[in-house]
Image: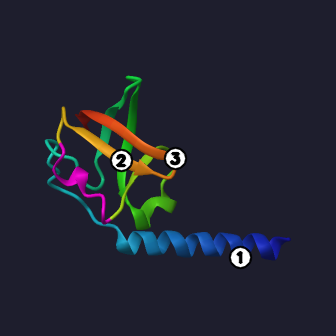
Amino acid sequence: MALKELAAIETRISTIECMLQQAEIIEDRDYQIVEIGSTIAVKVLPKGDIETYTIVEQKKQMHFKGKFLIIHQSQQVYSSASVGDEVTVDTPAGTNFFTIKEIM
């Protein structure tokens, strides 16, 4: 049992080291447009609920816990979206419509 736990811990350490090697520091963020790494507050249409998401690349999705929107190469709607814009996001559960309320 201890060997299995040790192996699991070593695997996790290796995964984290790989993530750190690929990490990019974003120094000059433009809070006027949505980009990878942005945290946004959106109004879900038509219900009107406000939800918060972090925008991540598809390859990084497994490393985040919590709510996030995955940006696929074909889904570049966020690269120029700003507060007040309505955007459409295709998910496995269907198409969602949002209005961007805040970029954090």
Three-letter residue code for mark 3: Ala
Q: According to the image, label 1 marks what residue?
A: 7
Q: Residue at the location (25% across, 58% down)?
A: 76
Q: Residue at the location (32% across, 34% down)?
A: 41
Q: In the structure shown, which secondary structural element does the residue marked by tag 1 occupy? A: helix
Mark 3 burial class by Cα count in 10 Å: few <14, some 14-19, many 20+ = few
Q: In the structure shown, which secondary structural element does the residue marked by tag 2 occupy? A: strand
Q: According to the image, label 2 marks what residue?
A: 89
Viewer-proximal residue, 56 or 97?
A: 97
Query: Would residue 27 be found to the left or right of residue 15 on screen?
Result: left
Magenta-colored stretch includes residue 29: no
Q: In the structure shown, which secondary structural element does the residue marked by tag 3 occupy? A: loop
Q: Residue furthest right?
A: 1
Viewer-proximal residue, 56 or 46?
A: 46
Q: Residue at the location (27% across, 33% down)?
A: 99
Select label 3 or label 1 by which is in front.
3
